[in-house]
Image: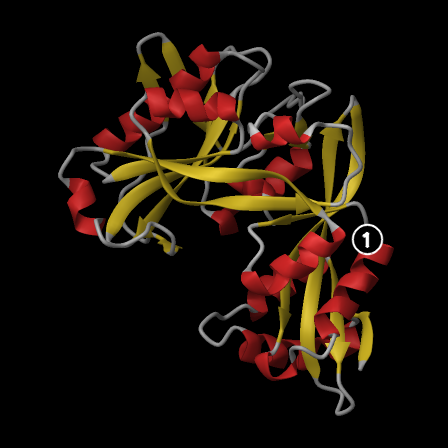
Amino acid sequence: MNICNLTEDRFDGYFKFLDRAYPNRNLKELFKNEILKKANVIISVNKNSQIVGHLTCYPCEFYLNNVITSGNFYCNFLVLQEHRNKGIGSSLVKKATTEHKPWFAFGVNNFSKSLAYKIGKIIGSSQKFVWFRNSYIPIKIFTNPLRKYSIISDTKELTDSIYTGRNYFTNLKSINNWQDYFWGNNTLQFSRPYKFLERKIFSKINKHTFYYFENSSPQVYFTVKKSYIRGLNVLEIVDYKVPNHTSELFIAIINAAKYLTKKLKFDGVIFESSHQYFDRILSFNNFIKIGKPRLIISNIETNISQEKIKNRDFLYITPIDSP
């Protein structure tokens, strides 16, 4: 079994592998136009020159201890069912951890969890919270977990601006003079350079809407997308940026999200939180937890205590950080 980096001459074989690995998803265009241009893909090739496994290493930058460091997200880790328990997964991970480190893995699946635990550690988790527009809506999904989703395709257009009391948010297609900022030395965050916003938020392919808080310093925003989850039309807040311990600004984002939900008559709005600070504010504003926390595993070296990690006081990440 040959473990190597994916090269252009193997693209046709790789797309055939994707069809087998993910039969219900057409991933060719996504990988061809997005992932293969920015990520390093490690593959496993059998003696018949067939690709039977892969692992994607997506470059990122993170802030910790007053330093911005380059790292990698590990994702799309899969070995075809008939080739498992042969050491292929371990070999893919070994090559990745040798060539692309430090690394992070979000929401690892059962197949990759055991390997991730052997070479890394849990550094936190991300928990979903939902607020429903009225008390009757939860009855629709009482027996179904809010997990699987697809982007909604309807005619409801999000508003150009949101005004809630003294807070004014504007829908922007780009942002000028963006300056990233961070909470402090003991909080891990992933960087938001303008190129990141341009690729992950302002790109038309992502179907995200960016709301900017006028006259805020440092700059405050949130990003929303329309989704369809288990028969419900919901708004998902996929990214939000606020300064440290400015509860009034995060509450302003919550109120703006609720305003959109009511105005467009969506069923609810979903936030995802990785920090107990946001947990408390969301709970206080009538959001309830849904689903299981999404684990974040990494091999970064840090002197942060396990108590701080257990108390969800170390990470500030949002869904858009995940590749």
Check the image and name the residue furthest to the top.
166
| Position of residue 23 measured from the top left corner of the image (x, y, whole percent) | 48, 77
Q: Residue at x 47, y 28 (%)?
A: 222
Q: Quadrant of the N terminus?
A: bottom right
Residue 115 placement: quadrant: bottom right
Residue 172 versus residue 49 in the image, above or below: above
Residue kind at label 1, given as amino acid type: His
Judge whether 128 appears above or below 39 on screen.
Answer: above
Q: Looking at the picture, tell me which residue is in the foreground, 89 or 159.
A: 89
Furthest residue toward front: 307
Q: How is the image coloured?
A: secondary structure
Q: Residue at coordinates 27% horizontally, 54% vertically from top-left?
A: 144
Residue at the right extreme?
Answer: 98
Q: Is residue 201 visible?
A: no
Q: Residue at x 55, y 27 (%)?
A: 311
- Which residue is identified by label 1? 100
Residue 85 placement (x, y as % from top left): 67, 77
The answer to whether residue 64 shows anywhere in this view is: yes
Rendered view: 43 above or below 56: below
